[in-house]
Amino acid sequence: MTPEFLYKYRGADLDRQVETLANDQIWMASPESLNDPFEATVVVDRDRFETFDLLAFATVQELLGISRKTKGAYQQFLEALDKFIEQVRGWGILSLTQNPLDELCWAHYADSHRGFCIEYASEQLLALDLRSEILLEVLYQERPPVLDPAELASVREAELKSYITSALIATKSLRWAHEEEWRVVSGTPGLRAHDFRAVTGLYFGYRMAEEKRRIIMERLKGRGIKYFVVEPIPGHYTLRPEALEDPFADAPKYRHSAASIAEGVPTIDEFLRSSGYEGLINEAIEIARWEPYCERVTDAYVAASRSTPDNPVFYVTCDGPGGLPRNFYVSKQQIEQARRKTRVGVD
């Protein structure tokens, strides 16, 4: 099960790290740039592939597009495998952990407690630019994984690339097990955008100067982030987080503005009039246009597949960052909750 929160330690070049964080971005690193020289290491026993009857397995036949009469199927398979391994080694990786209080991680990745650790809400992180990427839990073992022909041939075609990807990208030596690592895997390295609401907390190392903490808080103001300082417990080999007050808690909300609505939206047809949804759909639009990543409302209607007679759901299509369309779904229950908040003066 994916943890609700995942964490990223940051230390080196702290000013650049803060700037990336403030710009709602993450860095997808190439495997070769990571600190483990054994990244993307697998063992392929080529002799076993040569003696194994690959043609006896439908999965491999479909993968390679070969028939039982084809000779040298194993050479074709190994060529395809080598090509895929090389491709994976050019992908991007975001290394995360499920433990924000690991002593070695604070020492190695957070500049000996002079850096910080970012808390991400996992579900929110895998949205926007990262919504089509995969999240893998790292497996730790004594030796590098061996790609066994019999085992590969038994894997379903739809899962074969995922199986090999996990072996390459999400398998490490037992010596790294304390990191409790999870990885977001992307097709290319480089900067990627994320929903700013994915950052829910920031843990400062206890050696970071108070003034530096304040500068970072000011740079991230208006986002509702929780702040902590991680301190050693006297008499123990244990770290604990102590909550910090946000001096900028009353700052205006980040990315808080209403999107424009395209002319003619919504189109009120006979169904909306007769169902009594005309008022509800306009309220749904009003809710969606305040979403931080809604820049212009272009369409709205009933989401029939998500609706029930007691709780109709409306989709509101918005132009998002980069002009990409995105649907927001607003239910009658959410509309009623928004009404109650308005009545009691909750923004």
Image (spheres, grey):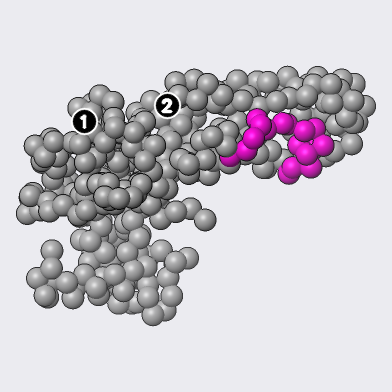
Disc 1 element:
helix
> Mark 2 highlights which residue?
29
What is the residue that sits farthest to the front in this orientation? 235
| Above or below, 250 relative to 109 | below
Give the amino acid type for the residue marked by disc 1 in the picture. Answer: Glu
Membership of 24 in magenta stretch: no
> Mark 1 highlights which residue?
19
Membership of 154 in magenta stretch: yes
Residue 5 visible from this viewpoint = yes
The residue carrying pointer 2 sits among few (fewer than 14), some (14 to 19) or many (20 or more) residues within 10 Å by Cα, namely many
Q: Tell which of 8 and 175 is nearer to you.
A: 175
- The residue at 18%/75% (across/down) is 340
| Above or below, 223 relative to 179 | below
Q: Tell which of 133 and 10 is nearer to you.
A: 10
Give the amino acid type for the residue marked by disc 2 in the picture. Answer: Ala
What is the residue that sits farthest to the bottom in this orientation? 310
- The residue at 79%/42% (across/down) is 154
- The residue at 13%/36% (across/down) is 209
Q: Tell which of 84 and 302 is nearer to you.
A: 84
